[in-house]
Image (cartoon, helix red, strand yellow):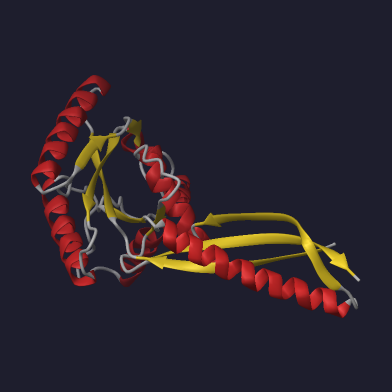
Amino acid sequence: MVSANATAVVRQRPSVLLMIARVRAAGATLDASLAEMHQLADDTVRRLMRLGATRAWAGDSHPDDQADPDPIARMRAAAGRGARGATPEDRRGVNVAVAATWDITGLSADAVLSLVDQLRFDVAANVNPSEPTSEREPLPWADPAAQIQHMIAKATQPEDDRSPKFVYIARPTDEQLTRASAEAYRAARGRAERLARAAGRQLGVVSSLNYGHAASVRPDRMMTDQRCSALLAAVGYVLEEDEVASDDPRATELAVTVHVSHYLAE
């Protein structure tokens, strides 16, 4: 018996734009913070619907240390807090992720970029206005050592990023998946034939045939795929069987893999 596998890639333009914005409140008490946060979340949902969203909703409330769904950002934030020591302000806030979807089927790449730019500006200006910070920039004539210390502190303590996050969801058609499966099968069979000839045999009947698809098989996309999965989980968005998520507004790659085994004949 000889086994071989092959992969074919489907590139599909996104059909759904998912935007995630974080709303935060930090009141004098936890009850006050929760009440303010829920009011902000409700206002945000209504505003996103007025911006043309097909659906908008709010997730579950959570503290500051669980606010960023990006695992790398969470590790950096934790390292920054550990370097300067925990302060009461680190645990004051409560957060909720607000999400909305737009149907972008048929939109050109330019139209999608324009929509994202509009949403980024509108949401950043109205959903999460900048909060005053107690840390002051050093004056231009300050001691050079103080300026260097300030630069190092900013590098090790990244600012709280509440800018909107965008995920692009594609829905490959059955026809595309069928063509990709056929292409992958032909490539896998060709490899199996070469292995059989190298052993002085010929391919017999098929013993088993399995295929599946995943968002990406490129090593350089692994961190991006994990980040998209974390963002989706933060707002409870579950991908359907025919949906693939990416951070690329141009196209999403779907890898269709076929694994085939043949009996060997004389």
Tell which of 134 and 262 is nearer to you. 262
Q: Is residue 46 left or right of residue 208?
A: left
Residue 176 at least partly seen: yes
Picture quadrant of residue 183 = bottom right
Q: Furthest residue to the left?
A: 50
Residue 161 locus on image (x, y percent): 29, 52
Looking at the image, residue 98 lies above or below residue 165: above
Q: Furthest residue to the top?
A: 31
Looking at the image, residue 134 lies above or below residue 14: above
Picture quadrant of residue 69 = top left
Picture quadrant of residue 104 = bottom left
Quadrant location, the C terminus: bottom right
The residue at the point 19 percent across, 71 percent down is 110
Tell which of 217 and 98 is nearer to you. 217
The residue at the point 21 percent across, 48 percent down is 133
Quadrant location, the N terminus: bottom right
Q: Is residue 190 left or right of residue 160?
A: right
Residue 202 locus on image (x, y percent): 84, 73
Tell which of 47 and 88 is nearer to you. 47
Tell which of 14 and 155 is nearer to you. 14
Residue 167 locus on image (x, y percent): 33, 55
